[in-house]
Image (cartoon, coloured by chain):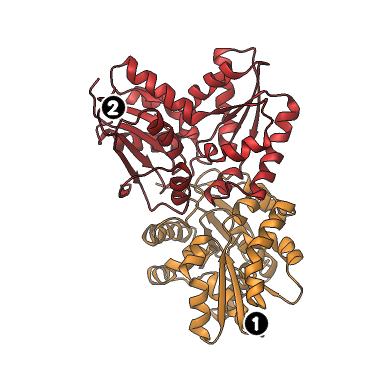
Chain colours: A red, B orange
């Protein structure tokens, strides 16, 4: 229980900071090293082979920081690269999809779960597969919401245009009868307020970032990898290219504080 | 006047097809080879050095197709890489910024030009510089419209959410007193209808894609590089990675027809 090595967290860009925020809230004494591949964001439209190659590169960079675990704070990478990363690296690897799927299964009462995400995540059917691998009697209705990421990145977190798009995206799912909604994109926790406004209080909201953080906590306990309780958890943030305006949006909305950002150009 | 080599056109992604459309309309007998860097789109947030390196790679790939000219159908590349491309390659190089700036100067009566574009293009001040290099008594008001690209890519070309965002973006420019508006992003010609609805008929709209095509025509004439009038202009389209849904949006909206798309993975 005295492992001060950092938890390595990576994402295709900046969105994965919602997972960092959830980890900070839950595991304040853990050191965290975050790496966002801003040079090559977004991963969604890229082929699975390309995403796997990039994921291995990022994981290697974090292993160079002596990471004690690899947290894949990206739905696209989680949906195509977890088996490969688990095989290649000796440290535990945790993604965002399985924890979200498990939390949704616990939350649903009518056994009808909704999932929203980017077009790539929804097309991959990753949440549906993860849910059905555990309980195949559950129905999953999915919807790609491709405009939510740009609206979030522009900081329109409380804005009538964003609310309008959320209503448009969610209406078919609600009409379909879901009682639980999985936020299947690491950007979406920044819209929790807006989505809650649109949803009736009957609908359970499942935040993949929070549930990923809970899975990390359990894994650290199980494998005796926790930092000392008195450790002052440090957060180190690096990007592969200059970060855009969304970094300010995310930092402000998440109230995350971190020091100087490291630029780690890709080879 | 019998040069059947293709005109090479490249862009960071799919948006440059608006320039292809303008070229097809104006120069139907010319062969065109288009290359979109979908593997690395978007270029806007990337550093100038990175964009320059990518631009040279794409230009080299088109030169491998024996291009007789290089058309940079991308504002980001046009704003940072034209001198380098001109130096590196022996064929004529034409971007979208200078033709747009010249057309705006011809259109304005009150000598007050508005420019809209992505955040990167507006931040670069490229149109302002190009305008002032010709006439420094002209006033230029610029506005980044970062949500227009995702709205276009989603195909919301005639949609109240898009109209609302256009109004929000254009209002300050109109209040400022512009009489001419430059569409400083190769995606924006797809919104000509929507933007025309919002603008009063007093405002002149300058389409960079169209003006780029006119500049290409003049250059071909000047340098005797035209294809034979009877040549059946062929359009060849290649991308560095799988193209996303926007390709269907663009193809339908532009009514562009092309055969099988070539996938040209980057080394």
Of A21 and B248, nearer the camera is A21
The residue beneath circle 2 is A68
Identify which residue is drawn at 66% across, 63% down: B189
Q: CA distance from mark 1 to mark 2?
A: 62 Å
Residue B184 appears in the picture as rendered: no
In this rendering, position of residue A57 left or right of residue A134? left
Residue displayed at 36% across by 47% down = A240
Mark 1 element type: loop
In the rendered structure, the answer to whether residue B79 lies left or right of residue B217 reads: left
The total of numbered circles placed on residues is 2
Helix, strand or loop at mark 2: loop
User: Horizontal and vertical percent for residue A44?
Assistant: 52, 39
Q: Position of residue A162 (x, y in %)?
A: 64, 46
- Judge the density around disc 2: few (<14), some (14-19), many (≥20) Cα neighbours within 10 Å: many
**Residue at horizontal 73%, vertical 69%?**
B199
Whether residue A126 is visible, yes or no, is yes
Mark 1 vs mark 2: give the one in front. 2
Q: Position of residue A263 (x, y in %)?
A: 31, 50
Which of B235 and A142 lies nearest the eye of the viewer? Answer: A142
Q: Which mark is residue A236?
A: none
Res A49 → quadrant: top left
Chain at numbered mark 1: B
């Amino acid at each position: 229980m005295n492992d001060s090595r950092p938890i390595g967290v990576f994402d295709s860009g900046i969105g994965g900071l919602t997972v960092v925020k959830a980890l900070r809230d839950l595991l304040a004494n853990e050191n965290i090293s975050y790496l966002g591949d801003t040079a090559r964001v977004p991963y969604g439209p890229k082929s699975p082979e390309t995403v796997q190659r990039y994921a291995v590169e990022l994981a290697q960079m974090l292993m160079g920081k002596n990471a004690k675990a690899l947290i894949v704070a990206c739905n696209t990478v989680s949906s195509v690269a977890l088996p490969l990363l688990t095989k290649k690296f000796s440290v535990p690897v945790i993604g965002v999809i399985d924890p979200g799927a498990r939390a949704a299964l616990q939350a649903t009462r009518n056994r009808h779960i909704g999932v929203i995400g980017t077009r790539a995540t929804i097309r991959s059917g990753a949440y549906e597969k993860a849910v059905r691998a555990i309980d195949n009697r559950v129905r999953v209705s999915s919807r790609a919401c491709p405009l939510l990421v740009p609206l979030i990145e522009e900081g329109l977190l409380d804005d009538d245009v964003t609310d309008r798009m959320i209503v448009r995206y969610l209406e078919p799912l609600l009409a379909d009868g879901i009682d639980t909604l999985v936020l299947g994109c690491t950007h979406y926790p920044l819209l929790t307020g807006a989505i809650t406004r649109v949803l009736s209080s009957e609908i359970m909201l499942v935040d993949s970032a929070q549930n990923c953080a809970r899975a990390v906590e359990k894994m650290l306990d199980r494998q005796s990898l926790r930092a000392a309780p008195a450790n002052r958890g440090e957060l180190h943030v690096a990007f592969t290219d200059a970060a855009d305006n969304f970094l300010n949006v995310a930092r402000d909305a998440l109230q995350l504080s971190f020091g100087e950002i490291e630029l780690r150009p890709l080879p």
